[in-house]
Amino acid sequence: MKQWVVHAWDGTDEGALARRLAIRDNHLAGARGLKATGNFVLGGAMLNDDGNMIGSTMIVQFETVEERDAWIAREPYIQDGVWADWKIYPFRVADV
């Protein structure tokens, strides 16, 4: 499968953390679904110096770009405006 790393930064407005927390259960349910199908490799929240969530990093894998794009289209953090700026790059997990 082809792998990608997603780097995503949350919005910086006053309601950004509350928006993330309101959507978080849906995002995690989606990640669990990806894990069950073998599409989730690893991921988690990026934190600021105070320990507050300010973004996400995920490594995902899909057979095709179309499957990857279908996941992006339904990702709650994208749909509901949690991730204000995100990039996705081809990636390969090291076999160590």
Image (cartoon, helix red, strand yellow):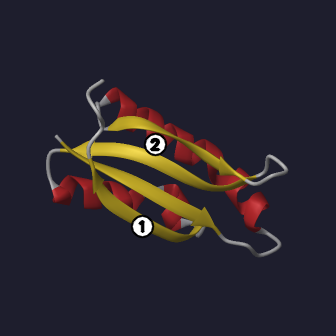
Q: Residues within 10 Å of mark 2 (few under 14, many from 20)?
A: some
Q: How many marks?
A: 2
> At 38% from the left edge and 31% from the top edge, which residue is drawn?
35
Of residues 94 and 38, the one drawn nearer to the viewer in this rendering = 94
Q: Which mark is residue 40?
A: none
- Label 1 vs label 2, nearer the camera: 1
Looking at the rendered structure, the kind of residue marked 2 is Gly
Task: Looking at this view, name the residue that lies furthest to the top.
Answer: 96
Q: Secondary structure at mark 1?
A: strand
Alpha-carbon span between mark 1 and mark 2: 19 Å
User: Residue 44: x percent and y percent?
Assistant: 56, 41
Label 2 residue SS: helix
Query: Which quadrant of the rendered structure holds the N terminus?
Result: top left
Q: Which residue is mark 2?
A: 30
Q: Does 11 appear above or below 89?
A: below
* Residue on which the image places disc 1: 87
* Most foreground residue, 15 or 88: 88
